[in-house]
Image: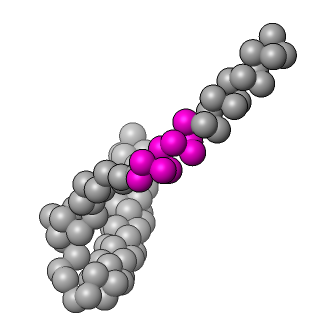
């Protein structure tokens, strides 16, 4: 029975080594992406808080149409509805 537990322990040790290597590789990729973000953001620190602040959008201004533009849109819509009613 001792043989089975030692092979199981060796399996877990090998799995742990592999996972630690993967973790180190991912941490390096994260560092690279953060550096790219910092460079893209104009040197700002690329932390989750900073990136959330830079991606927050300002509310859009409401577009205002001139009276003439509104009249043209209304006339075009009336024309479309008149054609629709003819066909019905």
Residue beneath the point at 24% across and 60% down: 58
Q: Position of residue 70 (x, y in %)?
A: 48, 44
Q: Position of residue 84 (x, y in %)?
A: 76, 21
- Which of the colour schemes (rainbow, by chain, secondary structure, one colour) is used? one colour
Q: How many marks?
A: 0
Residue beneath the point at 68% across and 24% down: 81
Q: Is 70 covered by the magenta stretch? A: yes
Q: Is residue 36 above or below residue 19?
A: below
Q: Is residue 86 above or below residue 37?
A: above
Determine whether, in the image, residue 41 is placed left or right of residue 77: left
Task: Give the position of the C terminus as an image quadrant.
Answer: top right
Point out the residue furthest to the right here: 87
Q: Is residue 28 above or below residue 7?
A: below
Q: Main secondary structure of the magenta part?
A: helix
Q: Position of residue 30 (x, y in %)?
A: 33, 73
Residue beneath the point at 57% across and 45% down: 72
Determine whether, in the image, residue 7 is placed left or right of residue 85: left
Closer to us: 38 or 86: 86
Q: Is 73 covered by the magenta stretch? A: yes
Magenta segment boundaries in residue numbering: 66-74
Quarter residue 61 falls in: bottom left
């Amino acid at each position: 029975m001792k043989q089975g537990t030692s092979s199981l322990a060796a399996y877990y040790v090998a799995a742990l080594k592999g996972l630690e290597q993967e973790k180190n590789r991912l941490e390096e990729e994260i560092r690279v992406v953060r550096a790219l973000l910092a460079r893209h953001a104009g040197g700002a620190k690329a932390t989750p808080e900073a990136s959330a602040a830079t991606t927050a959008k300002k509310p859009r201004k409401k577009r205002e149409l001139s009276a003439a533009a509104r009249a043209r849109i209304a006339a075009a819509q009336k024309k479309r509805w008149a054609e629709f009613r003819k066909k019905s």
